[in-house]
Amino acid sequence: MRIRADDPMTAAPTPRRRARTTAAEPPAEGAAAGLLSDNDMYERMVSAILDHRLPPGTKLVEDKLAAAFGVSRTRVRPVLVRLANEQVVTLTPNRGASIAQPTPEEALEVFEARRLIEPRLVELFIANATDAHIAALRACVDEEESARAGGDMRRAIRLSGDFHLHIAQAAGHQTLGRILRELVSRTSLILMTYSPSHAREREEATACGCREHRALIDAIRLRDAKEAARRMLDHLARIETQLEFTPPASEVPDLATLLGA
């Protein structure tokens, strides 16, 4: 078959069709001014939730968020939608956004999901982790214990979540890692809502978490995937049993003290 010189499928591009290379690419929105990206805003809000600085039910006024981030309201809205898709934020028509308040049913579902995926993640961690990864887990528990000893329960709970995220990251399973990150954020809201009401019980729950994390590290260090998976399940089940879904009974007022002269 003869190929014609003017065949448009084979002919070289003419000069007038060549793409211009001298024009500079326009900067991404907000980049030139040094504004926060959508992901930066998302990460800051997730961190505030994990640190228990944004408790369940907190109203998220778009104007105030925009001012805090130094961006326009239109930049804030997609971040709230992303958080709503992860069930961390609730968007209500005509009422705006607020930090989600998980129901007891949702709390149980979150822990059920974690029990399904975290044994698998710890098995993958053992298969892929280096000594440096295990050392990082140990350092995370050390920090958690230090925070608890100093009375910083917010930081202790945040570090407890970080422990599980370290395992997911080193496990190398991108999809399960993303799912767990959402579940850890929702777990933080659950713990804020349904943690034991008495301070001593809260501290004991955190202390148990540190001991269980160290026991899990022992199984990981021995590369015993079956035992590590079992300890992970026991750890998650223990946290779930600590939750108080029934509000504590209010004390009966002493009428003589309340109404007496």
Image (tube, grey):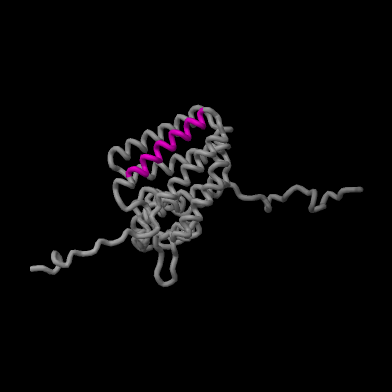
Does 218 sit above or below residue 56?
above
Name which residue lies at 41% across and 42% down.
Answer: 160
Name which residue lies at 56% across and 47% down.
Answer: 116
Q: Does the magenta stretch include residue 218?
A: yes
Name which residue lies at 50% across and 40% down.
Answer: 232
- The magenta segment is 203-221
* The one of 96 and 114 positioned closer to us in this rendering: 114
| Residue furthest to the left | 261
- The kind of secondary structure the magenta stretch mainly shows is helix
Does 184 sit above or below residue 228?
below
State the image quarter where residue 144 is shown. top left
Left or right of 250: which side holds 44?
right
One can see residue 235 in this view:
yes
* The one of 252 and 103 positioned closer to us in this rendering: 252
Name which residue lies at 58% across and 33% down.
Answer: 127
Quadrant the C terminus occupies: bottom left
Left or right of 105: which side holds 201?
left
Residue 71, percent across and down? 39, 57
Residue 9, percent across and down? 79, 51
Residue 80, percent across and down? 44, 59
Residue 183, percent across and down? 48, 51
